[in-house]
Amino acid sequence: MIDFEKTGEKAHLIDKELERVLPKKGIENLHDAINYHMDTGGKRLRPLLAILACEALGGDVKKILPFAASCELLHNWFLVHDDIEDGDKVRRDKPAVWVKYGLAHGVNVGDYMAQKVFELILHSKDYGVSDDKVMKLLDAMVKTSLRTAEGQTMDINLRSNDKPTEKQYFDMVIGKTAHYLTVTLVGAAIMADREDLIPKLIDFGKNLGPAFQITDDILDLTEGKGRKEIGRDIKEGKRSILVVHCLNKCGGDEKKKLLTIINKEPEKTTDEDVTYAKILFEKYGSVEYAKQKAEKYASDAKKIAGKMPAQLKEILDFFADYIVNRRK
Amino acid sequence: MIDFEKTGEKAHLIDKELERVLPKKGIENLHDAINYHMDTGGKRLRPLLAILACEALGGDVKKILPFAASCELLHNWFLVHDDIEDGDKVRRDKPAVWVKYGLAHGVNVGDYMAQKVFELILHSKDYGVSDDKVMKLLDAMVKTSLRTAEGQTMDINLRSNDKPTEKQYFDMVIGKTAHYLTVTLVGAAIMADREDLIPKLIDFGKNLGPAFQITDDILDLTEGKGRKEIGRDIKEGKRSILVVHCLNKCGGDEKKKLLTIINKEPEKTTDEDVTYAKILFEKYGSVEYAKQKAEKYASDAKKIAGKMPAQLKEILDFFADYIVNRRK
């Protein structure tokens, strides 16, 4: 069993890698903005998974450090731009970067972080990683960013779609999350000369991704995803699994009212609106349906994990459990 | 003398490279948005320079095609995000991407293009470019994006600075343009095994960049930079060389009024405001000063070009003349 309390030292190694390319001091409204964002918490879960998976596959942990750190940066770059795209003003209980530093800096800071992702991976050479492997890591990272951005497009498109289907929802979710969640593991496989595992890891991601997103959709209604705000997704008009399921079940006035609520501007959506949507989700069994779906996907992910080398399987199982059982 | 009328075939090769990674059809509001932006014109000047420079240095032109195309994409990615950062609603006489497709897609489309820059460079392997060279191309591209984003930060910062100095202006300009303008040439040098030329090429850029930017600053007041709008920079509050020079020359009420004008929201700046600024620039010789500065930088750039291999020198001279003499 993986004890994340004992991974402090590894997290420290990641922070050192990040500091190498992101000095604490630098250009005003750039380096301070990145540090502001990176310091707002975040679990450093992704790089830890890269390290643990590399170790599990017998790879040289030191060599994966820059790539592992780049995964953390990738994650945070997406968050900086996502907050702009979603109009989210709060991130981890603090003002989002674009709110604190303004929209212009917000866009530019994200762009800079995206480039630092590649600078970090190129640094792998300093640890004796071969050109061939660095290229493969870069390729995996580019693929990940591209698939994620494609999924993000589908997500934005879906928000103005009043007849969202489950297929559209899952295409979007798999696009947004399958590569994104597993790129750390793919990097570990490359580093440990186990590229044969990559297709299975992507398959794992295609199941873990929906489990992750559905859990996220449900958490928005219960815990508020660390934003101290319940129902933010409803305000933003996100077509969550709950919305998609409910819209396909209800009809007449209920459907009309739900659409009116999710299509309102975020600021104009009231707490009563959110409550109405929640009650409707319960009435049509959408929450229960979502939970079952999440469990099914997580269980399918674990089946794929079961075909992996034993030590890697343990990490994947932990990851799957963590994704589904998290509270924020 | 380089005749750009005769470069149609080469431009076609570039478009083919771009089409390889950017299909005409694809995900709605992503691939169509990119094609919309890329079709809005643009001179394909950058990739042509890469090809011509590679040829001049005896490199294999075919091998530089993906990198050359990636430079065009880099340029266009920056434009998509720049328009958001500057609040520019019009690009090449058509609505900017973020205006036509919305802010969320605008940010995401730019991110996608940025990743496609790297996908393109990784494709160089298909043309038999060695891993070592691909890595160097990637490194040059990352450095370019980072320096440009740093310069962009300084540019945004400067817009809220009421005591901008010439040093701040030139630091910003060199950050934004020196690598950006020359990355095509650096790529050509890498491909042609003439990395010894890179420091000189960067020096060339450090002189060409200011010549380029100052010309841009002046064009904004005369030709409108293809936006059919004179004085857009004044409306956006950009600290152009004209503004910086004039603020350091005038005083009292004039200074106060100029600051009021450039610090107004773009929509609130009137044509009379622009005219007032123009008259003030003339009164204090700011336009003449700017022209002289541009010529000096261009001439210094040419001096550096003079130390290059003869065939490359011809291209650099053409580039320098083009930059300073262009009308949009």
Image (cartoon, coloured by chain):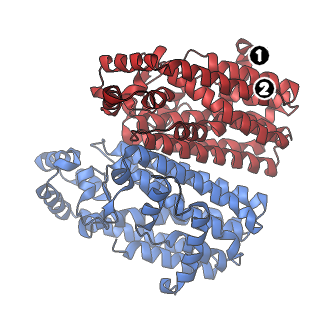
Chain colours: A red, B blue
Looking at the picture, tell me which residue is in the foreground, A255 or A63: A255
Asked if residue A121 can be seen in this view, the reply is yes
Q: Is residue A133 above or below residue B91?
A: above
Residue A270 percent location from the top left of the image: 29, 20
Q: Are marks 2 and 1 on the same chain?
A: yes
Q: Count numbered badges in the picture.
A: 2
- Left or right: A110 with respect to A314? left
- Left or right: A184 with respect to B25? right
Residue A88 percent location from the top left of the image: 40, 30
Which of the two discs, 2 and 1, labels the residue nearer the N terminus?
Answer: 1
Residue density around tag 1, few if under 14, some if 14–19, many if 20 or more, within 10 Å = few
**What residue would you read off at disc 2?**
A52
Q: Is residue A146 above or below residue A288?
A: below
Looking at the picture, tell me which residue is in the foreground, A102 or A160: A160
Name which quarter of the figure residue A9 lies in. Answer: top right
Residue A10 percent location from the top left of the image: 73, 22
**What residue would you read off at disc 1?**
A2
Regarding mark 1 in the picture, which secondary structure is present there? loop
Subunit of label 1: A
Which residue is found at the position 27% from the left and 70% from the top?
Answer: B223
Looking at the picture, tell me which residue is in the foreground, B21 or B288: B21
Looking at the rendered structure, the kind of residue marked 2 is Leu
Subunit of label 2: A
Name which quarter of the figure residue A248 lies in. Answer: top left
Residue A86 percent location from the top left of the image: 42, 35
Measure the alpha-carbon separation of dots 2 and 1.
Answer: 9 Å
- Is mark 2 in CB contact (under 8 Å) with mark 1? yes
- Left or right: A81 with respect to A18? left
Which residue is found at the position 46% from the left and 49% from the top?
Answer: B151
Looking at the picture, tell me which residue is in the foreground, A79 or A265: A265
